[in-house]
Image: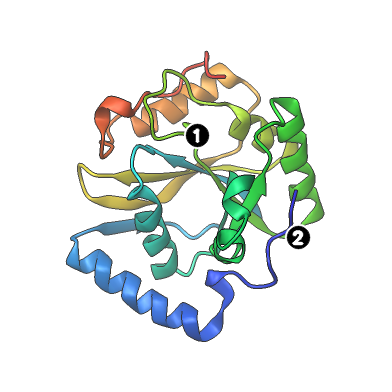
């Protein structure tokens, strides 16, 4: 797995301050509130859901800038080619090869966790903007195998609130943990509700 650059958008001093001011202003103009608890854990998996629109990413990014949260995220390796190569890495992206399925991809990400002193990694389990019937459960297996907590990040268009505050250590009991995750996201409204499905134990 490719390493991120020495500095991301969250660690570039002057630009970070300027963008934070812009983020705070835009959230205020578009009437978005944030509800964020700053983690004390050096490593964690941040679940990003519901994810049904391209608007989800800039809203989450604005919230991260507002609260000075430095996070990374997984993206398809083709995003990091050509002109977008440095841009997406600067935005905190970590490229992954989608041809690595199941345990291969999980192992790769777990190794990245073990190699770093600090990593807050955002993963969108829906993995697509199209309608899905099941979440991909790689995020859960990564958290279990890396021994890091799950933080539940959200973009709720119903209340126009974005953030992350709920968190827990995955127990290894997938049924129980997925019920807890589904209970958290059930009241939230995506931008496109018809594309969203709650996680179940049958997730891939």
- Residue in front for this viewpoint, 92 or 180: 92
- Residue in front for this viewpoint, 74 or 71: 74
Residue 17 lies, in percent from the top left, at 44, 81
Count of residue discs: 2
Decide if residue 104 is in sight here: yes
- Residue in front for this viewpoint, 95 or 61: 95
Q: Which residue is mark 1?
A: 127
The image quadrant of residue 168 is top right
The image quadrant of residue 97 is top right
In the image, is 73 to the left or to the right of 60?
right
Of badges 2 and 1, nearer the viewer stands 1
Task: State the residue at coordinates (18%, 60%).
Answer: 31
Q: Residues within 10 Å of mark 1 (few under 14, many from 20)?
A: some
Residues under numbered marks 2 and 1 in contact, where contact means CB atoms less than 8 Å apart: no
The image quadrant of residue 60 is bottom left
Task: State the residue at coordinates (76%, 40%).
Answer: 108
Q: Secondary structure at mark 2?
A: loop
In this view, 131 is above or below 188: above
Q: CA distance from mark 2 to mark 1?
A: 27 Å
Residue 116 lies, in percent from the top left, at 76, 57
Residue 7 lies, in percent from the top left, at 64, 73
Q: How are the residues colored?
A: rainbow
Q: Which residue is mark 2?
A: 117
Q: Secondary structure at mark 1?
A: loop
Q: Given the current orientation, which residue lies at the most extreme bottom position?
A: 14
Q: Residues within 10 Å of mark 2 (few under 14, many from 20)?
A: few
In this view, 133 is above or below 14: above
Task: State the residue at coordinates (66%, 30%).
Answer: 141
- Residue in front for this viewpoint, 31 or 78: 78
Residue 145 lies, in percent from the top left, at 74, 34
């Amino acid at each position: 797995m490719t390493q991120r650059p020495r500095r991301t958008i969250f660690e570039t001093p002057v630009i970070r301050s300027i963008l934070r001011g812009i983020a705070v202003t835009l959230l205020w103009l578009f009437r978005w509130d944030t509800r964020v608890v700053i983690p004390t854990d050096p490593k964690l998996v941040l679940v990003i859901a519901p994810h049904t629109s391209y608007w989800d990413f800039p809203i989450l990014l604005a919230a991260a800038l507002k609260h000075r949260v430095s996070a990374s995220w997984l993206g398809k390796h083709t995003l990091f080619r050509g002109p977008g190569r440095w841009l997406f890495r600067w935005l905190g992206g970590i490229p992954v090869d989608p041809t690595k399925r199941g345990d291969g991809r999980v192992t790769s990400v777990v190794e990245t966790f073990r190699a770093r002193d600090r990593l807050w990694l955002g993963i969108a389990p829906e993995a697509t903007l199209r309608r899905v019937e099941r979440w991909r459960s790689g995020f859960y297996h990564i958290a279990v195998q890396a021994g890091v907590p799950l933080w539940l990040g959200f973009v709720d268009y119903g209340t126009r609130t974005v953030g992350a505050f709920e968190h827990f250590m995955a127990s290894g009991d997938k049924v129980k943990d997925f019920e807890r995750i589904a209970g958290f996201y059930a009241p939230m409204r995506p931008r496109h509700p018809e594309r969203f499905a709650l996680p179940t134990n049958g997730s891939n």
